[in-house]
Amino acid sequence: APQIRSIENYRDISKMKVYEGNWTAKTRDHLIRRIKMKQKDQEINQDILIKIFENLKGRVHVANQNGLQFLMKF
């Protein structure tokens, strides 16, 4: 269930940071440099990961109680 997989959330946040300002990659290497730059600038950092995983238990509980369709509302 992608709604409760924390790695999906991290990927979405990372993608948002990399492509903010309508940035586009011209080559694969260009994209790799951009990702590394965002990580170095702490725009994609461990605090994001911590917050995502802190919320995991709550999302699993909500899914267990109300079904996965309930999570799609958020």
Image: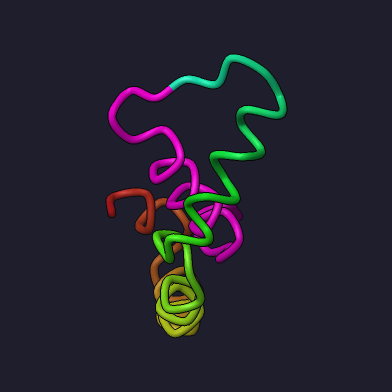
Camera-nearest residue between 14 and 29: 29
Q: Residue at x 53, y 64 (%)?
A: 4
Quarter placement of the C terminus: bottom left
Q: Residue at x 55, y 21 (%)?
A: 25
- Please provide percent x and percent y for residue 37: 52, 50
In the image, is 53 to the left or to the right of 29? left
* Residue positioned most to the right: 28
**Can you see residue 60?**
no
- Please provide percent x and percent y for residue 20: 33, 35
In the image, is 36 to the left or to the right of 50? right
Magenta region, main secondary structure: helix
Highlighted magenta segment, given as a residue range: 1-23
- Please provide percent x and percent y for residue 49: 50, 73
In the image, is 1 to the left or to the right of 14? right
- Please provide percent x and percent y for residue 5: 59, 62
Q: Residue at x 39, y 68 (%)?
A: 66
Q: Is residue 20 above or below residue 59?
A: above
Q: Using the rendered view, name the quadrant where residue 41 is placed.
A: bottom left
Asked if the magenta segment contains residue 4, the reply would be yes
**Can you see residue 5?**
yes
